[in-house]
Amino acid sequence: MDDFRATLARFRVPLEDNHGLSQGVWTLDAVYLSNTALVLDVGAPIGAAPGQLPAHRDELDRLARQLSHRAADHGVLRPVALVVRVESDELHAELNRWTFDQDWHRGEFLFYLVSKDEEHADLLRDLVAEGETESVEVGERLDERVLQARVEARMSPDHELFERLRAALVAPQPGSAIEAGAGLDAVAAWTSEALREAEKLTAQPTPEEGRLA
Amino acid sequence: MSRRIQRIASVTLLGFRGFIKECHLDTNADIVILAGPNGHGKTSFLEGVVLALTGHHTCEDPGTLFSYDQPELNVRLDVQDEDGILGTLAVKGLREVGPAPRGTAKPFTRTASWKGSNAELSSVYGRATGAPEDEPELDARVCAFFQDQVWAQFDHAARGRTLRDVFEPVPPRWQMAVEDQYKGLRRALQDLANKISFYGSDAYPWKEREAIDKEFSEYAETLRSVYRPLAGRRGWPAWPATFDGSLAWTLAEVRSEDDERGRRRFLERLEATLQEEIRKDRESLPRERGRLESVERRLDEIRIQLASIQDAFPNLDDEASWFSGRPGLLEILQSIEENLTRWRREATIAATTYPELRAVQMEVEAVQVNVATRRHDELQLWIGPRRAAQTERSALRAEEGRLLEERESLLGTSPLEMLKPQLAALRMENTLSRWTRQQELAAYDARREGRASAARYLEDKRAQGEALLDAYEAATSARTELRLPLEKRMNTVLRRFALTEGLYPVHLDSVSLRRSGDNGEHRAVAIVADDKRPLAALSTGQRSQFAIALLIAQNDVIRASPGVGLPHHVMLLDDASSSYDLSNLTREAITWRKLAYDPDRTRRRQIFISSHHDDLTNHLLDLLSPPGKSGDGFQPSLRVFQFKDWRRESGPVIEKYRVAPPRTGEDQIREDLARNLRRGPP
């Protein structure tokens, strides 16, 4: 994330333990400020005892609000987002409930949980970046000309059925309609010929469906 | 309109909905927030902007867009293009007839001009295809969100064309013809597959092949057993040339019709001769003549006796059963004759003691014993012979059965008698049927190579058809054209929301829509959650999140499409905040900040947001507060219009605010915050 212009500070220090937590504390790895948001990159407390989670939550709450208020003192108002890395599935499930706890965050800060490095980097980039970073690429419109070209590209030059259907595939002029049913006739003629040829090869009529096993 | 509107600098409304008097608002900001209570004109304001920007409105009756009793409506947008060139978009409407507030309206006049010159207006569809038709609904769906019409954001609620219709513009009749071809080709290929299955199989396809083999083999054995003991007798049919001496024949020799007739003649003669031989043989047998003659004589007598009984009583079994019962009528009459005198005496005594038996006494007195005796005798005279005849007939039949068995035993010493079952097995219809089926089997075996050739040939044809279908489907699939970019962009926006488990990521499916009263078929994308939940299964808030994500995704996709484009950078959101919880409101703000405060001007949008809840509005104001000036001189801006009141004679009363960016320079703030942080985390 070093390429972020918005990086305010990078460090890896444990937060002050105001609650006397015996197992694990949050680590604040970086703080980013951009036109989009004030983002705190936080590591989850490893080995936190389930009984101490409320206290952990208070710690996080204090961190988010203090930074938010300090920025506001300068007139900087931004959505505040906590991006929390958590590796333990058990802890992830517990912390995920905090996301929906409005009594806790009151919408004053956002709580994002990530577990994979790639996901972590993508989310940070998305939240910090000023403007959308994702480029949108759309293929060409599928008009008749494009459609015919694509079908042709997949067909061998001697594809008999395609040759017969070519006229029905694309209208002679853009916007003009082809005759409905022309393609069906071509398909029917092609299959009839194929069956007649097959009959010749077997020297016997093709069997009625009802007599097939 | 070849220029692209970067920003709506001001909006003027007159005679539109609740804007009775002219209302002019300076909207020259990156984000414009419209705040105020319900019914004060916020939504109408956004509807007016959408009408001028796209030409679209959702009213069934355009007359309702006019202010009460106003004959004319006007909406004007003063705009700037990407180069700062000024222009104007205007919509003018005249009420035609009818009382206020409803009534018909003449078609609205919509104009655009840049520096005094008129510009062309066309919809997304028109720009994409060059078609003259104006179809503004899609234009509105990709730039505007109205909470009370959230369903309209999705393809399946679209009345006009969808984004897929634009990007995959297969003309409906053409498309239908191609799809008909698909169906015809698919049917044909299925038929070929069935034939190939038949031709390609080495096994005889009729289920009873084994049964035929078994029957035919038994038949051959029967024929052999019939023929062998009689061979050489005079009158015995000559063995057919097509059969070898051991009665096995080669199937290849039994094909022609002549052979069929020859077999028939042979079998007929064989059967007739066999019958005759059995008869003659029986006549010449040495017999136990005494016993046999005695048996046959007695059998003749029995037949005569049975015939005479039949003649005397043609309905013997029925009649003998008449008047039966427990007891039968005969027995009842007999009992009356024997007991009536005593019953009368007892009835008299009983009736004296028990009055309730008087009716019984009267009935008993009414019976006449001499009449009962006569009837008994008459009935006895009629039924007696029948019962006796029945008994006699049973005895005769039993005796006849024993004698027949004995007679058969006496005759059974003839070896030809043993052939009688085989004779039955040689009945013509059975024989010829088996023969014909065996012939078919032979022919089938003989054509195995031809069948294999036909199978190979048809397989080749089928592969050709499949290849063409694959090519059609690959060419018309939306997989790489539209669906994936939309899906990806939607998920980027949705990821910022707090979504419950199973919603993210969403998936888009390509589907077809056919709407009532619409001849064509529309292509659409259907949105489903990761756990396959359809939109209809989502909550109101979740549906709004999906709609906002789709709005942004579609807006982006159109903007990124060469030859299509979108003629403006404006997005309008009516009441988008009301269905969100506090967390998601904040999360959505991140998206709006990205769009509105993007340093890259080509990607930046001007965003109008309305909100009717003061708490949410204040929260939103904090979240959307503009940052300081960026390095390249871009100063993001935010304006707020507080709709304070609405008056019947004039319309909304609006207070206007600018939200100032931080006084301190952004860099200075960064340094200060960073300095504090480096001292140690808070």
Image (spheres, rainbow, N blue to C red):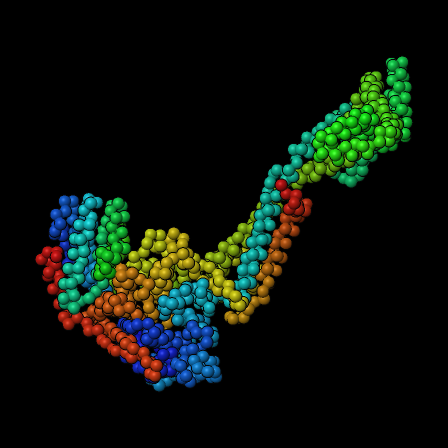
| Residue at the (41%, 78%) spot, across then down | B65
Residue at the left extreme of this rendering? B679
Q: Is residue B378 visible?
A: yes
Give the mark count.
0
Where's the C terminus of chain B, which quadrant?
bottom left
Seen from the viewer's position, the closer of residues B376 and B257 is: B376
| Residue at the (15%, 59%) spot, across then down | A66
Percent coordinates x, y for residue B442 in the rendering: 69, 37
Asked where in the image residue B140 lies, by quadrant, the reply is bottom left
Left or right: B474 in relation to A127:
right
| Residue at the (27%, 60%) spot, across then down | B583
| Residue at the (16%, 44%) spot, across then down | A23
Where's the N terminus of chain B, which quadrant?
bottom left
Asked where in the image residue B234 lies, by quadrant, the reply is top right
Q: Is residue A13 visible?
A: no
Left or right: B181 in relation to B221:
left
Percent coordinates x, y for residue B573 in the rendering: 33, 69
Percent coordinates x, y for residue B12 in the rendering: 33, 81
Seen from the viewer's position, the closer of residues B24 and B207 is: B24
Percent coordinates x, y for residue B572 in the rendering: 33, 71
Left or right: A60 in relation to B153:
left
Name above or below for residue A55 compared with residue B72: above
